[in-house]
Image: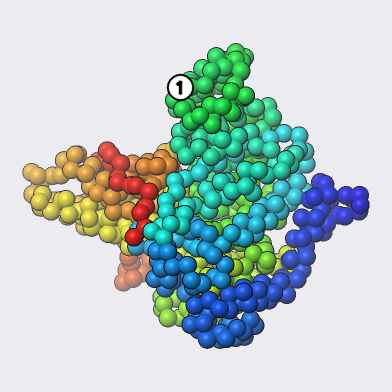
Amino acid sequence: MAVDAMCSPLGPPACEKDAKALQFIEEMTRNADTVQEKVLGEILGRNAETEYLKLYNLDGATDRDSFKSKIPMVTYEDLQPIIQRIANGDKSPILSSQPISEFLTSSGTSAGERKLMPTIREELDRRQLLYSLLMPVMNLYMPGLDQGKGLYFLFVKSETKTPGGLMARPVLTSYYKSDHFKTRAFDPYNVYTSPNEAILCPDSFQSMYSQMLCGLYEREQVLRLGAIFASGLLRAIRFLQLNWHELAHDIRTGKLNAKISDSDIRRCMARVLRPDHQLADFIESECSKDNWERIITRIWPNTKYLEVIVTGAMAQYIPTLDYYSGGLPKVCTMYASSECYFGLNLNPMSKPSEVSYTIMPNMGYFEFLPHDPNSTSPNSATSDKLVDLVNVEVGKEYELVITTYAGLCRYRVGDILRVTGFHNSAPQFHFVRRKNVLLSIDSDKTDEAELQSAVDNASKLLNEFNTSVVEYTSYADTKTIPGHYVIYWELLVKDSANFPKDDLLEKCCLAMEESMNSVYRQGRVECNSIGPLEIRVVKNGTFEELMDYAISRGASINQYKVPRCVNFTPIMELLDSRVLSSHFSQSLPHWTPERRR
Ligand code: AMP
């Protein structure tokens, strides 16, 4: 059939393969409720004999009403004992009738450690299916992507084994190492400059170096630049700032830097490297300029857009991305997690602030807990309040609750979403925020309790100097690359002759980092995605001024609480104008790939 004849309501597809994908999106979203009912039936049917569903006396029922009346809504902490049993090697059908193939390590943490999400082999196909829908949608808005390549900075992270021998690794590491990715069929609309060998190298320096080198050689062909998160793309720019001399040298000589020792990379780079004086001159002349504004479009002049997640916490990077790219469009294609891939952005050229994700009803069973930002009662969250996918209301906020093929049942993801509209009968959601996250630079998520205990631990070092921290607040500083946490401290120094010295406050910085969760410490040590923590000591009385300011803007004096994280410019200016001294962590906190009890 001619492609035009297959025109989708979303627009004319670029090729027949795209037409099929767009048709699939139409079918799923038109029949969202039927698909959801079918998905739930399948999940409950195949898992009928699992320990978990039996515990709640589902008795093999697969209908919505039985499910809703019998199965409770849960958090990770509720499931942790079960998950630990699976991790320890219990192979009986606990959550899923299908064998748990591995654990995906979420960037969300519980008791300071990454959450372990059980998954089954077929989930890879489901993830692959969602990936296969992204370019057909993109091609509707950006023609000609088959005429060039994508420079995507993609990385694998370290893997560990649970005591029972199951692999535990991030979902993207699992995907890049799978045959789905490694032996993907050639698709002219989806050609990367980075060879698999470079993406799969566990050493982040070698991986980034070789991906950057390939991107420089193919600078004219690059039509789109990306990374998973905005922070990752900025790290690549920083890497170029630090390493362009060596990269240009390799290009000039056609010889690979000796620091790249990975034999797979060396073998594949031998096919890429060739002496190119003109290119080396160009890189040197652009990179040696003091001004790096629009460096992306200077080096990769045919780039049409950046593909990075800039929704949620990543929105903080938009001004810096705009600076380096001259305001190129920023495309957020999908919304996903280790637990389940949720959906995609059907209007990828929309402004970041207007991005909405359409949840695909075939990916899992989705329910929504109405979210009242003003409610303080934890008991108000009961499963009888859960709303089905097609019944959410435009303008309202909900917390996402999922039931997956791998056996999570009515599991609270912790994401707060606002309904912006519908595509057919499938709702579209704006990602509002992740619950309880105070600070985030990359995939780290630090909550208020973690920050409090880090401050408590660090301030113990001050005791012997008769000094205490009377107030504190924090800020995710993304002006540096990588970004870093800034903690403002107001100190009570009882013996002014004994004011804490620089080295003591540096130790306090490290003590705070040691107290942070493992995702933070991994970001510091393995990924280099988070810079050294900074303590800024402010003058006495600064926090009182902060309160006065809040009250002058209408806050109630009785209810005023010191904000534990700030990002409002006038407040930042006030704090920064009162800084007496600033101190950085001088070493790395401990981190080893986690060993699972
Ligand atoms: P992880 O469990 O480490 O895979 O992280 C998944 C979480 O990342 C989600 O639950 C969201 O909080 C966040 N996330 C994923 N995709 C997006 C997106 N497109 N926009 C904003 N946040 C996202």
Q: Residue at x 82, y 46 (%)?
A: 15
Q: Nearer the viewer, residue 145 or 124?
A: 124
Q: Position of residue 169 (x, y in %)?
A: 47, 52
> Residue at label 1?
258
Instruction: Give the side of residue 567 with respect to residue 26, left or right.
Output: left
- Report the quarter where the C terminus lies: bottom left
Q: Nearer the viewer, residue 222 or 580?
A: 222
Q: Position of residue 565 (x, y in %)?
A: 37, 56
Q: Residue at x 26, y 45 (%)?
A: 510
Q: Nearer the viewer, residue 94 or 273?
A: 94
Residue 394 visible within the image: yes
Instruction: Give the side of residue 429 with respect to residue 505, left or right.
Output: right
Quarter holding residue 33? bottom right
Q: For the residue labelled by badge 1, is the local secondary structure a helix, a strand or a loop?
A: loop
Q: Position of residue 575 (x, y in %)?
A: 32, 49
Q: Residues within 10 Å of mark 1 (few under 14, many from 20)?
A: few
Q: How is the image coloured?
A: rainbow
Q: Residue at x 55, y 38 (%)?
A: 199
Could you tell me how many numbered marks the image carries? 1
Q: Is residue 187 above or below residue 312?
A: above
The amino acid at mark 1 is Ala
Residue 383 visible within the image: no
Q: Residue at x 30, y 49 (%)?
A: 513
Q: Nearer the viewer, residue 135 or 205?
A: 205
Q: Is residue 145 above or below residue 393?
A: above
Does any atom of ligand 1 lie closer than 8 Å to the CB of label 1?
no
Q: Position of residue 391 (x, y in %)?
A: 66, 76
